[in-house]
Amino acid sequence: MKKFGIRLIETPEEMTLVEQLQRDVWPGSETDVVPLHMLITAVHNGGLVLGAFMDEKIVGFIFGIPGLETTSDGPRAKHCSHMMGIHPDHRDGGIGFALKRAQWQMVRHQGLDHITWTYDPLLSRNAYLNIAKLGAVCTTYRRAEYGDMRDGLNAGLPSDRFQVDWWINTRRVERRLGKRSRPTLKLAHVARSGLRPFYPVPVSTDGLPQPPEHVPPFDDRLLLAEIPGDFSGLKTRDFSLARDWRFFSRELFETAFANHYIITDFIFDANEGRPRGLYVLIHGESTLDEFE
């Protein structure tokens, strides 16, 4: 893959490139494109737009704004990472990780220690980046966060989302973003430990994973929750099955978080004939350091 560079985007001319890239990443709904004037306003008021460029052509971007969160001590400043998009021709090449790492560096320079963002919990590749590679954690499930979405990637399904917490000054995150990053978990590690997913995921004759009919009881402090390894492909082949997975996973994760479980890791494996994705959940009474 060709080399790419990351740089801040601050001019109207380059913001126009970000507008067009949004259309390439999320086709089908012009009204969902964040326009140039909003991007400019954001960066002039503490927001960040970073672009990935290859031969001076934009191939990825990330956009975030300052925000406030409610705590027991009152409002607290954070960074809200609103959008990240990679051109379809340049995915799986490390661009997303590089954009998030650059964002991590810039937000730390702003004096903040917390970044949040949302993503579809059924997208295994996103989960692998956000949880396994970057070290974000999750205890928040938001139903229909964006209402009825109209773009080609999201139309037709409830826009349920995880909101993740990225505590950017922690040892956990620094171990993942440093020069000697922590290796990600593999299915082989799980097999050697004797740990098994806490519900079966049978595969139909046409090769599609089927969700369980019911969420099982949460009896152990460490759980593996499996999701489709390729939810986008599953949705294309069997939309009703995709809806079944949405409603099963909604009940699963809402129940887990209500019972004080935390998502701390993710396993993605595409080497067993079909891609598989598994979330690692630990009970909140355990410490994250036990599983680092």
Image (tube, rainbow, N blue to C red):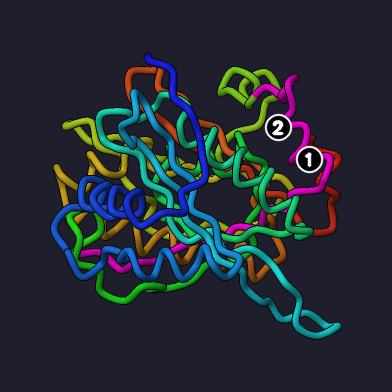
Which residue is the site of mark 2?
A: 176
Q: What residue is rendered at 42% in x and 31% in y?
A: 276
Instruction: Characterize the local packing of mark 2: few (<14), some (14-19) or many (20 or more) Cα atoms within 10 angstroms.
Output: some
Marks 1 and 2 sit apart, C-alpha to C-alpha, by 7 Å
Q: Are marks 1 and 2 in contact (CB under 8 Å)?
A: yes
157 falls in the magenta region:
yes
Can you say whether 200 is above or below 247 in the image? above
The percent coordinates of residue 258 (x first, y second) are 64, 71
Given residues 228 and 172, the one toward you in this image is 172
Q: Which mark is residue 172?
A: 1
Q: Position of residue 86 (x, y in %)?
A: 35, 39
Q: Residue at x 27, y 47 (%)?
A: 21
Q: Is residue 133 above or below residue 29?
A: above
Q: Amino acid at mark 1?
A: Arg
Residue 194's x, y, as percent? 67, 25
Q: Quadrant of residue 148?
A: bottom left
Q: Quadrant of the N terminus?
A: top left
Q: Position of residue 274 (x, y in %)?
A: 33, 24
Q: 146 or 285, which is in the foreground?
A: 146
Q: Amino acid at mark 2?
A: Arg
Left or right: residue 147 versus residue 111 is left
The quadrant in which the C terminus is found is top right
Query: The magenta stretch spans which residues?
Result: 156-183
